[in-house]
Image: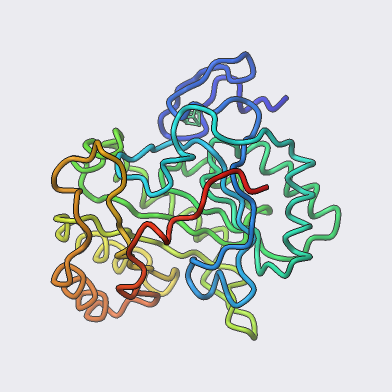
């Protein structure tokens, strides 16, 4: 039993439910970690995927549950995965390393953080050498991130919103902008500035990702300026245009992809600010770019 699941305060929602006693909070996760897909993944930034792929573990449930979620098949409240222990997770990490993975990429890990920490301890005792990536929405309590020192080498974090209104409308968390700067600062304290190996693969560091949303260019520009102000030279920035409308319940403004004009304006700002990092090509758009979540474990 992990005591952090009792009176759960693992994310800023601080539901204070006793998951060890069968209660569930906003995310819907129980006290047993659950995964949907474990596999090599090639769709991350080139410094993460490399040519061998990133050893990716897709955890089920999510602390944000954005209405436009590209992974909504597994981020919803109901159970859609397979229960897995820390020991079994560690075994899977070793298998991924043996398959050639450049890293272990923990996607949507926050709600299972205690189990994940234990699994990393076990994998390290068993000799795993590749870096661990914490792939998060960015909706994190800085003190929880601080506890990941000695476990995580790379943070791959979203910076979703600067506007509290958008955060409330799309993810029911208007306090997202209150947490994001402190959370990323804590990540960078742990990783330091980005370091690549001889093959151009990230060994340690933080990548800040921003998924552009249709009609929200001004928020994107504010976010890039915040990144420049607070994290210039200490993190890489990844500007993503892959937003694809999925599901029937989206508001009208989210029922289209990013326009060429929106994207070119954003990339011009990226260059004008001198940000270090990545921009995506048009070919990144489309539902065929969303992983197949059918319990591949
Ligand atoms: S991890 Fe889940 S239960 Fe815990 S505080 Fe966050 S949303 Fe609530």
Q: Nearer the viewer, residue 282 or 196?
A: 282
At 46% from the left and 38% from the top, the residue drawn is 75
Residue 123 horizontal side relative to residue 248, left or right = right
Q: Which colour scheme is used?
A: rainbow
Above or below 24: residue 275? below
Counting the numbered discs, the total is 0
Residue 67 occupies which quadrant of the picture? top left
Q: Residue 225: horizontal and vertical position, in percent?
A: 24, 65
Above or below 251: residue 93? below
At 32% from the left and 51% from the top, the residue drawn is 160
As drawn, which residue projects farthest toward the right? 126
At 30% from the left and 73% from the top, the residue drawn is 282
Q: In which quarter of the image is the N terminus?
A: top right
Q: Nearer the viewer, residue 239 or 214?
A: 214
Residue 201 horizontal side relative to residue 164, left or right = right
Q: Residue 123: horizontal and vertical position, in percent?
A: 79, 52
At 43% from the left and 71% from the top, the residue drawn is 236
Residue 129 horizontal side relative to residue 186, left or right = right
Q: Nearer the viewer, residue 91 or 146?
A: 91
Q: Residue 124: horizontal and vertical position, in percent?
A: 79, 55
């Amino acid at each position: 039993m992990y005591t952090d699941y009792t009176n759960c305060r693992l994310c800023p929602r601080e539901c204070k439910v006793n998951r060890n006693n069968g209660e569930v909070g906003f995310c819907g996760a129980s006290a047993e970690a659950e995964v949907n897909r474990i596999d090599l993944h090639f769709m991350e930034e080139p410094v993460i995927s490399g040519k061998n792929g990133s050893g990716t573990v897709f955890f089920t449930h999510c602390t944000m549950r954005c209405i436009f979620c590209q992974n909504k098949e597994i981020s919803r409240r109901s159970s859609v995965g397979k229960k897995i222990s820390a020991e079994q997770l560690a075994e899977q990490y070793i298998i991924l390393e043996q398959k050639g993975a450049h890293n272990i990429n923990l996607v949507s890990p926050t709600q299972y953080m205690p189990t994940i920490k234990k699994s990393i301890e076990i994998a390290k005792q068993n000799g795993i050498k590749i870096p661990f990536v914490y792939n998060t929405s960015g909706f994190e309590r800085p003190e929880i991130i601080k506890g990941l020192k000695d476990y995580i080498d790379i943070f791959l974090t979203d910076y979703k919103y600067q506007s509290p209104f958008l955060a409330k409308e799309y993810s029911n968390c208007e306090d997202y902008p209150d947490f994001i700067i402190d959370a990323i600062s804590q990540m960078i304290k742990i990783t330091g500035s980005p370091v690549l190996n001889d093959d151009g693969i990230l060994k340690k560091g933080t990548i800040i990702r921003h998924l552009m949303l249709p009609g929200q260019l001004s928020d994107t520009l504010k976010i890039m300026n915040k990144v420049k102000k607070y994290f210039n030279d200490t993190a890489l920035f990844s500007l993503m245009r892959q937003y694809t409308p999925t599901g029937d319940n989206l508001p009208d403004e989210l029922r289209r992809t990013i326009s060429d004009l929106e994207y070119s304006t954003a990339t011009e700002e990226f260059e004008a600010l001198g940000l270090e990092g990545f921009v995506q090509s048009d070919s990144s758009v489309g539902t065929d770019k969303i992983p197949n979540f059918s319990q591949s474990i």
